[in-house]
Image: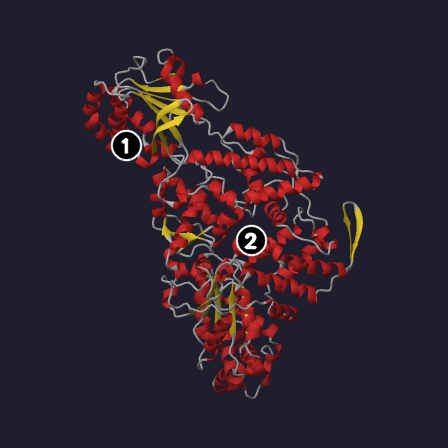
């Protein structure tokens, strides 16, 4: 309830409240008749945020009120018991009030200390004392400021102050009582002491330089369509998608990279061979070239690789001869260059001359053939005067042809007409990676594609991210032209990785290498490196290491490029024990070692802003609830699991905000947390924004759903020891007691980036204890019953039952083994 309505309601109920205050009611009656009316009807508290008759060893407190990040106790006294309050003002130190109200203050302090809280309210229905009765910063609690209201008339005179302290809206907004300026108490382990190498970067493993060049070649994008080696690599490394299997689970189908349904022009086909077949039909159909083909797909899904494979491998040799392929990668262009159409036409002509020398397009006899009609017209006209003077005729002809050639746009049109008429060849022009440019430049390229098709009668293929296509599909210039649109589905990540490693084993000529390892000279033969990649393949694709592939597949798909990059990070990280992998034929890569290498990369300690591993326990600024992101993801997971159709798995921001307000969540905080989840790629939007670079504008009507990586984090990453061990380093701690405990046992790194495992175990388990305490504080009741699964579920139980307890036993067992 907003302030003006609250004041209006208070004035209506004021006389009623006054009459209650002069009758001899018990404490229970005072609660029911006065406090319930004040807090529920006037100050806007919902029943779901209130617990009554709570018990502690200190006795029974009357009320506990709670939002998602703040709790306070109300002690209700009989209405005829008056408090001793100063005659003027509304503020003083608690020590001043203690003199005349010692019993009630000590009573509420007992409740508050028992429940590890800080704030409380004492009232008899007519008077109010509001204060922080317990300090956790070491300061003297008696020196805290207390706010008091002498009677209901005093409340009315100072209603803005009263409302701003006690109303649900105000506490949800401020996260606590707005009594006095208070430091936002949050502490980070990494900032708590001068940790060794805190700001340093760990040296890459001694073999990373050797591996980097090999890895970059193995996992690089296959884009040089004219290179023979790239052609062979393309044939062997390309992964062809098959149709969806009928026995996939509902969630697996939900997370698949399927053709979007937002536009009827998009061909509803996923099987790669079927996509090849349909595009071939477009190319072969009719005398004229087909409408421009737009290839869409999510970021990193393999649009460039698909185009190259299709044009170089799928298209038959005879058809390739009839379709000279001109490929242009617009990652190499500036936005200014895109606007210079003349320059692009010049580049097309230069590419024709360079890559199709057999056409002889720069030779004079071919140029004369291209312009034979125009030459004949000139000869029958003014040039007829020079028939007897060959020197002048030759000069005029040269000037004429030079002028034609220096007009690249019209010259290319003439070349295309010549190729079609005399060579039966139609140009195929590919404009790839247009989505790497600014929006206006992408629109310019779309118009260029239409122009090339019309002027050259050429086949034009343009690649775009589906997010950009979604934004523009009903806007100029996209709505003014007909196009053939095909969605490229990302292949399974494990197939891509396996094909690449197998290609390296089969084709690479590994040279003998000498290097230093731990200050010792080491010689590595080519056979050893070949064996390393064989062992690497065996280890990764064995059942025991399926977690690594699952992680890469679930957390990066459909961005295959990102998955390959993350795997590169693992191999070159200073935390990866490459030396043991090269020398040990039976090596195994534990998930926790992989996780550490990817999460830390070149750093000794974890910093969420720079890490590929995201911290779900770190709230946005202004929020002190560690579990907000987690509960939002759980809410979206429940919708996905219970929806009948894929399209029903989306929900609006407003629905989430409305439901979370039941548990006292601030709508502004919810939106900011969702924004971060979007940045993490843990949620997807129905508007297909997830693969574009621009910031998504969140409003109440934006529809979102859980993403594959978000779901995987909740159930497969969040509950693991190696995750808590990592993220606790950059998670704010809001409790001094637990902060000191964690700080005291947190182990520093040695020169190799290793930390004592026994202390790591103690640190992680203490951090988990802290999370359990904070979860209890998060809920308004010890047994939550909001009626919403995501709000009622125990995060503690989720973590314990999905890996943490098992991991702890494994680490403890290994410690016992090492001691023995």
Label 1: how many residues lie within 10 Å, few (<14), some (14-19) or many (20+)?
A: some
Q: Is residue 751 visible?
A: no
Residue holding disc 2: 551
Quadrant of image for the N terminus: top left
- Against 55, residue 292 (above or below) is below
Q: CA distance from mark 2 to mark 1?
A: 48 Å
Quadrant of image for the C terminus: top right
Front residue of this view, candidates 659 and 92: 659
Report whether 533 appears left or right of 693.
right
The spot of residue 34 in percent (x, y) is 25, 25
Front residue of this view, candidates 420 and 482: 482
Q: Quadrant of residue 471?
A: bottom left
The spot of residue 115 in percent (x, y) is 43, 27
- Against 820, residue 177 (above or below) is above
The spot of residue 458 in percent (x, y) is 48, 75
Label 2: how many residues lie within 10 Å, few (<14), some (14-19) or many (20+)?
A: many
- Against 570, residue 624 (above or below) is above
Residue at image location 63% in from the left, 40% down from the top: 812
Of labels 2 and 1, earlier in sequence is: 1
Q: Quadrant of residue 818?
A: top right
- Against 764, residue 400 (above or below) is below
Report the residue that reaches farthest toward the bottom: 388
Residue at image location 34% in from the left, 40% down from the top: 662
Front residue of this view, candidates 199 and 434: 199
Front residue of this view, candidates 629 and 566: 629
Q: Secondary structure at mark 1?
A: helix
Q: Is residue 29 visible?
A: yes
Q: Quadrant of residue 524?
A: bottom right
Residue holding disc 1: 40
């Amino acid at each position: 309830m907003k302030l003006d309505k609250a004041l209006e309601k208070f004035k209506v109920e004021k006389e009623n409240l006054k009459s209650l205050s002069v009758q001899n009611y018990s404490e229970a009656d005072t609660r029911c008749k006065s406090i319930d009316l004040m807090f529920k009807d006037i100050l806007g508290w919902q029943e779901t945020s209130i617990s009554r008759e709570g018990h502690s060893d200190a006795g029974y407190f009357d009320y506990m009120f709670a939002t998602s990040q703040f709790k306070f106790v109300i002690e209700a006294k009989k209405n005829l018991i008056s408090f001793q309050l100063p005659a003027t003002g509304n503020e003083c130190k608690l020590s001043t009030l203690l003199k005349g109200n010692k019993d009630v203050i000590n009573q509420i302090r007992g409740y508050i200390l028992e429940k590890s809280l800080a704030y409380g309210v004492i009232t008899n229905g007519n008077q109010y004392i509001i204060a922080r009765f317990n300090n956790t910063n070491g300061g003297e609690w008696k020196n805290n400021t207390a706010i008091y209201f002498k009677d209901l008339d005093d409340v009315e005179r100072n209603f803005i102050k009263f409302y701003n302290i006690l109303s649900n809206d105000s506490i949800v907004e401020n996260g606590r009582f707005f009594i006095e300026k208070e430091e936002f108490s949050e502490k980070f382990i990494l900032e708590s002491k001068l940790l060794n190498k805190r700001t340093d970067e760990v040296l890459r493993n001694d073999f990373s330089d050797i591996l980097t060049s090999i890895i970059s070649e193995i996992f690089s994008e296959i884009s040089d369509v004219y290179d023979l080696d790239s052609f062979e690599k393309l044939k062997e490394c390309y992964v062809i998608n098959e149709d969806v299997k009928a026995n996939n689970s509902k969630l697996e189908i939900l997370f698949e990279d399927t053709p979007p349904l937002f536009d009827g022009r998009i061909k509803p086909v996923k099987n790669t061979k079927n996509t090849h077949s349909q595009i071939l039909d477009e190319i072969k159909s009719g005398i004229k070239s087909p409408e421009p083909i737009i290839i869409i797909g999510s970021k990193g899904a393999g649009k460039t690789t698909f185009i190259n494979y299709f044009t170089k491998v799928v298209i038959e040799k005879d058809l390739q001869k009839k379709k000279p392929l001109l490929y242009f990668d617009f990652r190499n262009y500036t936005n200014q260059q895109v606007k210079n159409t003349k320059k692009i036409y010049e580049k097309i002509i230069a590419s024709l001359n360079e890559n199709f020398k057999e056409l002889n397009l720069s030779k004079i006899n071919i140029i004369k053939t291209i312009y034979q009609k125009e030459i004949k017209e000139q000869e029958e006209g003014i040039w007829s005067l020079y028939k007897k003077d060959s020197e002048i005729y030759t000069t005029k002809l040269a000037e004429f042809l030079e002028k034609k050639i220096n007009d690249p746009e019209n010259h290319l049109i003439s070349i295309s007409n010549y190729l079609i008429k005399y060579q039966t060849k139609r140009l195929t022009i590919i404009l790839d990676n247009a989505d790497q440019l600014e929006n206006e430049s992408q629109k310019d390229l779309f118009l260029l594609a239409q122009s090339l098709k019309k002027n050259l009668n050429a086949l034009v293929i343009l690649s775009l991210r589906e997010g950009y296509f979604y934004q523009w599909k009903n806007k100029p210039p996209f709505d003014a032209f007909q196009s053939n649109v095909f969605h490229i589905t990302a292949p399974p990540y494990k197939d891509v990785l396996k094909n690449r490693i197998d290609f390296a084993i089969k084709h690479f000529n590994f040279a003998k290498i000498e290097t230093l390892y731990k200050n010792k000279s080491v010689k590595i033969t080519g056979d050893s490196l070949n064996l390393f990649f064989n062992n690497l393949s065996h280890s990764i694709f064995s059942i025991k290491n399926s977690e690594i592939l699952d992680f890469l597949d679930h957390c990066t798909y459909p961005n295959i490029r990102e998955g390959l990059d993350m795997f590169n990070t693992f191999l070159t990280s200073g935390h990866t024990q490459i030396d043991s992998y090269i020398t040990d034929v039976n090596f195994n890569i534990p998930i926790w070692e992989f996780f550490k290498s990817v999460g830390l990369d070149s750093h000794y300690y974890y910093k969420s802003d720079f890490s590929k591993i995201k911290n779900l326990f770190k709230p946005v600024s202004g929020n002190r609830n560690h579990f907000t992101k987690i509960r939002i993801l759980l809410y979206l997971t429940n919708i996905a699991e219970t929806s009948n159709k894929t399209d029903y798995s989306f929900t609006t921001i407003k629905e989430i905000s409305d439901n979370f307000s039941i548990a006292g969540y601030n709508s502004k905080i919810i939106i900011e947390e969702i924004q971060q989840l979007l940045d993490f790629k843990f949620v997807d939007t129905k508007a297909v924004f997830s693969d574009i670079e621009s910031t998504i504008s969140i409003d109440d009507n934006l529809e979102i759903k859980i993403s594959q990586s978000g779901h995987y984090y909740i159930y497969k990453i969040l509950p693991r020891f190696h995750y808590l061990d990592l993220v606790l380093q950059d998670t704010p701690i809001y409790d001094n007691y637990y902060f000191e405990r964690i700080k005291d046992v947190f182990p520093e790194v040695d020169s190799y980036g290793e930390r004592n495992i026994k202390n790591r175990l103690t640190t992680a388990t203490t951090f988990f204890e802290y999370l359990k305490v904070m979860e209890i504080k998060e809920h308004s009741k010890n047994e939550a019953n909001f009626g919403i699964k995501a709000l009622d579920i125990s995060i503690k139980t989720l973590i314990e039952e999905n890996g943490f307890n098992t991991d702890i036993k494994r680490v403890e067992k290994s410690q016992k083994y090492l001691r023995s």
